[in-house]
Amino acid sequence: MNYETARKFLIDQTIATEESPDALLTRLKQGKSPVPGQITSILLALKVVFEALKDASSLDRELVLALYQLSVKAQQFFSAGRKAGIDWPPLLKEDLLRISLAAESIFSGQWQTLTSMGLS
């Protein structure tokens, strides 16, 4: 996966379109679990974007919005679903935390992991 593909993929995960009807945020908002492999693909795309931008002095607004939404809104939808009684997959909470840490890594230019944050 190259940077442009990863960037587009991450943006597509925030809104459902004809190209990406199973966007992560749409699925979580609807109380549906991610499709198999979706979280892994998101984490891979985040790592590709991190590697491409770790020395960048600025980030584009569309990508920043997608990173914010994947970090914050995904967890909000997860929490709302849990309160509504949705039985999420067992590792989804941890996976969403990994997404948030990867987004933070892109913002900071230094890769964060659950272990480095003392969260494992």
Image (cartoon, helix red, strand yellow):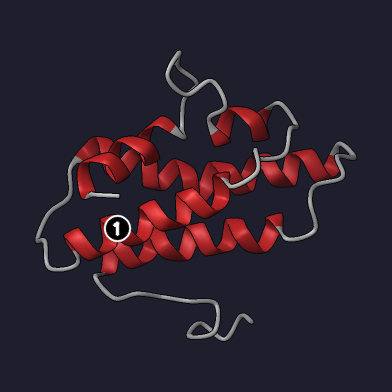
Residue 28 vertical placement versus 103 (above, below): above
Residue at coordinates 48% horizontally, 85% vertically from top-left? 116
Residue at coordinates 41% horizontally, 46% vertically from top-left? 68
Q: Quadrant of residue 119?
A: bottom right
Q: Is residue 115 left or right of residue 91?
A: left
Residue 58 vertical placement versus 55 (above, below): above
Q: What amino acid is at disc 1? A: Val
Q: Position of residue 117 (x, y in %)?
A: 51, 82
Residue 86 vertical placement versus 93 (above, below): above
Q: Furthest-right residue in view?
A: 85
Q: Judge the density around disc 1: few (<14), some (14-19), many (≥20) Cα neighbours within 10 Å.
A: many
Residue at coordinates 41% horizontally, 63% vertically from top-left? 102
Q: Is residue 82 left or right of residue 36?
A: right
Q: Secondary structure beneath disc 1?
A: helix
Quadrant showing the C terminus? bottom right
In this view of the protein, which residue sits in the foreground, 73 or 4? 4
Residue at coordinates 48% horizontally, 45% vertically from top-left? 70
Q: Position of residue 14 (x, y in %)?
A: 46, 32
Q: Position of residue 47 (x, y in %)?
A: 35, 62
Residue 41 vertical placement versus 26 (above, below): below
Q: Position of residue 79 (x, y in %)?
A: 73, 47
Q: Furthest-top residue in view?
A: 18
Q: Is residue 38 left or right of residue 101?
A: right
Q: Is residue 37 left or right of residue 93?
A: left
Residue denoted by label 1 = 48
Q: Furthest-front residue in view?
A: 1
In this view of the protein, which residue sits in the foreground, 3 or 62? 3
Q: How many marks?
A: 1
Q: Quadrant of residue 22?
A: top right
